[in-house]
């Protein structure tokens, strides 16, 4: 469907002008989020010792999802030094409530191996859809 921006119409022979797309498609935004998390894992998680938790997030289109934003988080495992938890969460559109799931846990190499799988992006998109739907109830 083509969206039109009437403010750009200057000539009476032109009835409507196509509006530029608002943002990148979900697949591209998820690719960028995954790439950012991978690079931060490589830089910030040591073999031994503690590290700060971090997250990368993307906004969700309110026409396709019930959630407002999705976040891929890496949190340190309090029980095992050098291990981390890879979490995915979706924020409720109206309240400060989220639905989240742990995707995997392990050291830096285990997380990167998990994220480098061919089907990881599809898993993230499917999980975002499922978590978004779970917020409706």
Image (cartoon, rainbow, N blue to C red):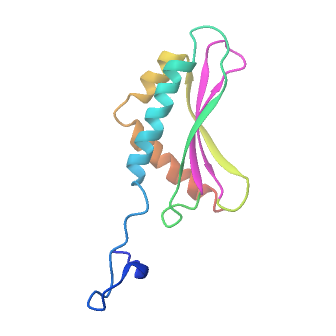
Image quarter in which the C terminus is found: bottom right
Left or right? Give the position of 120 relative to 102: left
Q: Is residue 31 magenta?
A: no
Q: Which residues are magenta?
A: 68-92
Question: Which residue is most to the left?
Answer: 13
Q: Is residue 106 above or below residue 132?
A: above
- The secondary structure making up most of the magenta span is strand
Q: Residue at x 37, y 71 (%)?
A: 19
Left or right? Give the position of 17 relative to 120: left
Question: Which residue is most to the front?
Answer: 10
In the rendered image, residue 57, in percent from the top left (x then y), is placed at 56, 43
In the rendered image, residue 44, in percent from the top left (x then y), is placed at 57, 19
Q: Is residue 118 above or below residue 99?
A: above
Q: Residue at x 66, y 56 (%)?
A: 92
In depth, the one of 41 and 5 nearer the eye is: 5
Q: Is residue 54 above or below residue 133?
A: above
Q: Residue at x 44, y 44 (%)?
A: 30
In the rendered image, residue 73, in percent from the top left (x then y), is placed at 59, 35
In depth, the one of 85 and 9 nearer the eye is: 9
Question: Which residue is most to the top?
Answer: 48
In the rendered image, residue 23, in percent from the top left (x then y), is placed at 43, 57
Image quarter in which the N terminus is found: bottom left
Residue 48 image-quadrant placement: top right
In depth, the one of 11 and 60 nearer the eye is: 11
């Amino acid at each position: 469907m083509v969206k039109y921006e009437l403010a750009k119409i200057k000539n009476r022979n032109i009835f409507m002008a196509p509006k530029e797309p608002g943002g990148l498609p979900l697949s591209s935004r998820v690719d960028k989020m995954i790439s950012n998390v991978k690079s931060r894992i490589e830089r910030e998680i040591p073999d031994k010792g503690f590290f700060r938790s971090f997250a990368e997030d993307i906004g969700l289109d309110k026409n396709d999802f019930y959630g407002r934003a999705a976040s891929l988080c890496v949190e340190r495992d309090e029980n095992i030094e050098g291990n981390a938890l890879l979490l995915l969460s979706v924020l409720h559109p109206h309240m400060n409530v989220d639905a989240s799931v742990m995707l995997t846990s392990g050291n830096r190499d285990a997380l990167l191996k998990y994220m480098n799988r061919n089907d990881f992006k599809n898993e993230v998109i499917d999980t975002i859809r499922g978590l978004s739907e779970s917020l409706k109830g």
